[in-house]
């Protein structure tokens, strides 16, 4: 039996609506004599990342923990802190094609939510990127205390959208999140880039 047509869209932030230039981290690593990729490796290690994504620690506390873990590589805690803070000043860029699509979808009367694993810096990031007011709801893992791909995350997102899971189309660039959304009853599409927008328009039938 065919699925019901989606009447709401839930969109991932990092990797979909926001993109990151890897050259920024690479330049910081070169400047501080670090091995390539070490900032991301430390920052995304699950022991440091999971608490900040569920709101148990703040973004500022997470930055401090990353600097502490980086200190042996730099040899000085002050330089480690400076490196992490310099890296963190870059807050990414909005994908203009995805933002234009979000505006199209909302203009067609379809609710659009941002579904993201994020820290308590998210609202400031949205403001800095001129995204405040561009989405109907924002579902931040650090606010609700549970992160993708947990079923409870998607249940909270659907509740925020006031739409049953079967009527929500979720878009993310990570396979685990896509699998979790499908387990929770949402339809889900694995994002590979703006070429996917044609499919999403068809799926939303607007």
Image (cartoon, rainbow, N blue to C red):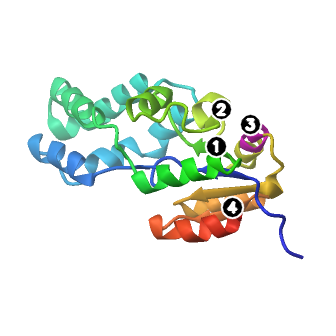
Q: Residue at (66%, 56%) from the top-left corner?
A: 170
Q: As rendered, which of 113 and 179 lies closer to the eye?
A: 113
Identify the mark nearer the N-term, 2 or 3: 2
Left/right of residue 120 with respect to residue 83 in the rendered view: right
- For residue 185, which numbered disc appears in the image? none
Residue 65 location, quadrant:
top left
Q: Which residues are magenta?
A: 156-161
Q: Which residue is mark 3?
A: 160
Q: Position of residue 97 (x, y in %)?
A: 44, 56
Residue farthest front in this picture: 107
Q: Which residue is mark 2?
A: 145
Q: Position of residue 119 (x, y in %)?
A: 50, 32
Task: Determine crowd level at label 4: few under 14, some 14-19, many 20+ residues with C-alpha closer than 10 A.
Answer: few
Whether residue 16 can be seen here: no
**Mark nearer the viewer, 1 or 4:** 4
**Mark nearer the viewer, 2 or 3:** 3
Q: Residue at (33%, 48%) from the top-left corner?
A: 40
Identify the mark nearer the N-term, 1 or 4: 1
The answer for how far apart the CA atoms under marks 1 and 3 are is: 8 Å
Q: As rendered, which of 40 and 119 lies closer to the eye?
A: 119
Task: Determine crowd level at label 3: few under 14, some 14-19, many 20+ residues with C-alpha closer than 10 A.
Answer: some
Q: Residue at (34%, 26%) from the top-left corner?
A: 64
User: Is there CB contact under 8 Å for labels 1 and 3?
Assistant: yes
Residue farthest right in this picture: 1
Q: Which residue is mark 4?
A: 206
Dominant secondary structure (helix, strand or loop) of the stretch shown in magenta: helix
User: Is there CB contact under 8 Å for labels 2 and 1?
Assistant: no
Secondary structure under the numbered disc 4 in the rendered image: loop
Quadrant where the C terminus is found in the figure: bottom right
35 above or below 201? above
Q: Which residue is mark 1?
A: 113
**Mark nearer the viewer, 2 or 1:** 1
């Amino acid at each position: 039996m065919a699925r019901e047509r989606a009447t709401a869209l839930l969109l991932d932030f990092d990797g979909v609506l926001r993109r990151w230039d890897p050259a920024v981290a690479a330049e910081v690593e070169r400047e501080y004599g670090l091995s390539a990729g070490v900032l991301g490796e430390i920052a995304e290690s699950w022991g440091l990342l999971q608490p900040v994504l569920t709101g148990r620690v703040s973004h500022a506390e997470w930055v401090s923990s990353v600097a502490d873990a980086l200190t042996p590589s730099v040899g000085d805690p002050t330089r480690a802190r400076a490196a992490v803070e310099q890296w963190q000043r870059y807050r990414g860029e909005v994908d203009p094609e995805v933002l234009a699509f979000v505006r199209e979808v909302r203009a067609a009367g379809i609710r659009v939510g941002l579904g993201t694993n994020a820290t308590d810096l998210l609202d400031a990031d949205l403001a800095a990127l001129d995204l405040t007011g561009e989405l109907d709801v924002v579902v931040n893992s650090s606010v609700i205390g549970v992160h993708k791909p947990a079923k409870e995350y998607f249940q909270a997102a659907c509740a925020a959208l006031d739409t049953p899971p079967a009527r929500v189309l979720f878009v993310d660039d990570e396979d685990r999140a896509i699998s979790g959304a499908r387990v929770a009853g949402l339809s889900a599409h694995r994002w590979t880039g703006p070429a996917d927008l044609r499919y999403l328009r068809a799926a939303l039938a607007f």
